Amino acid sequence: MAVHRLREVSCLHGFTRFEAAPTSADGEIEDVHLAVSGAPLSRDADWLPAIEQFGEGIFIHFDDEAIARWLQGEAMRRRNEKLLAGYGHWQKRFAGKAPQYPGIPYVLLHSISHALMAEIAVECGYPASSLKERVYALSGSRGGSEFDRCGILIYTASAGAQGTLGGLVATAPRFASILLGALERLRICSNDPVCADHEPDDRSGDRATHGAACHGCLLIAETSCEIRNLFLDRSLLVQTMAGEDAAFFRM
């Protein structure tokens, strides 16, 4: 669906040093967990600075039944176990306050979102850094077997001229070819076979939350990503040269 006009309101309610605040899946401030102590803007603040921006976007809704069938696959379950193990290594750095595992449907949609943003930037003419995402895949369990809704909003908003020219909504009629092009690009990464063979482990730092993902395929500008380039895996989208058959799309 083409979103011809949307409004984004950004509010600064505090800051951290060395460690950014992960965004919760539903956007609630009280659900944001930090590895470090956050600092408010001031004591007893009765107002907060905010900025209102207008822009455009496209919203993609996914078939819940198709994702539910994919979740039952044995190869997908094995891949989910590896990603859960990587999350277990990554959460140790938070001293018991790590963000929750968002679930395998979220990893799937988040990976699709990044692939689409890179492809749409070529099609619509806006720089990739001006595009942003909002992923809707609320998981009801730690393993990600239950979820309420699945969709992606890719948008751009700016107080200036960018985001007001209609280039993003104009890609909606060509979405099928854009999706196909994005998936074709993911089949082989410029860093393969190193990228395809990457396993989440205790030696990877933030990459412990990644499967097959690197700056050559799925990683984008952190200002465009809602969770700082965490929880990505292109092997959930297409079959890579690593050979695992957990892909959602059959090509």
Image (cartoon, rainbow, N blue to C red):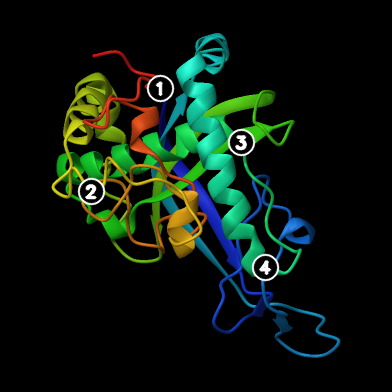
Q: State the image coordinates of residue 106 (x, y, percent, origin top left).
A: 54, 36
- When the figure is inspected, residue 70 is found, relative to residue 146, above or below; the finding is above
Q: Residues within 10 Å of mark 1 (few under 14, many from 20)?
A: many
Badge 3 vs badge 2, beta-carbon distance below 8 Å: no
- When the figure is inspected, residue 250 is found, relative to residue 180, above or below; the finding is above
Secondary structure beneath label 4: helix
The answer for how far apart the CA atoms under marks 3 and 2 are is 25 Å
Give the label on residue 246, or none: 1
What's the residue at 61%, 68% (across, down)? 21
Q: Name the residue under label 4.
A: 94
N-term mark: 3 or 2: 3
Give the label on residue 185, or none: none
The answer for how far apart the CA atoms under marks 3 and 1 are is 15 Å
N-term mark: 3 or 4: 4
Q: How crowded is mark 2: few (under 14 residues within 10 Å), some or many (20 or more)?
A: some
What's the residue at 30%, 37% (across, down)? 116
Badge 3 vs badge 4, beta-carbon distance below 8 Å: no
Q: Mark 2 points at which residue?
A: 194
What's the residue at 57%, 75% (across, down)? 19
Q: State the image coordinates of residue 4 (x, y, percent, origin top left).
A: 40, 37
Q: Residue furthest right?
A: 44
N-term mark: 3 or 1: 3
N-term mark: 4 or 2: 4
Q: Quadrant of the C terminus?
A: top left
The answer for how far apart the CA atoms under marks 3 and 4 are is 19 Å
Q: Name the residue under label 3.
A: 103
Badge 3 vs badge 1, beta-carbon distance below 8 Å: no
Of residues 53 and 81, the one drawn nearer to the viewer in this rendering: 81
N-term mark: 4 or 1: 4
The answer for how far apart the CA atoms under marks 4 and 2 are is 28 Å
Secondary structure beneath label 3: loop
Tell me which amino acid carries mark 1: Ala
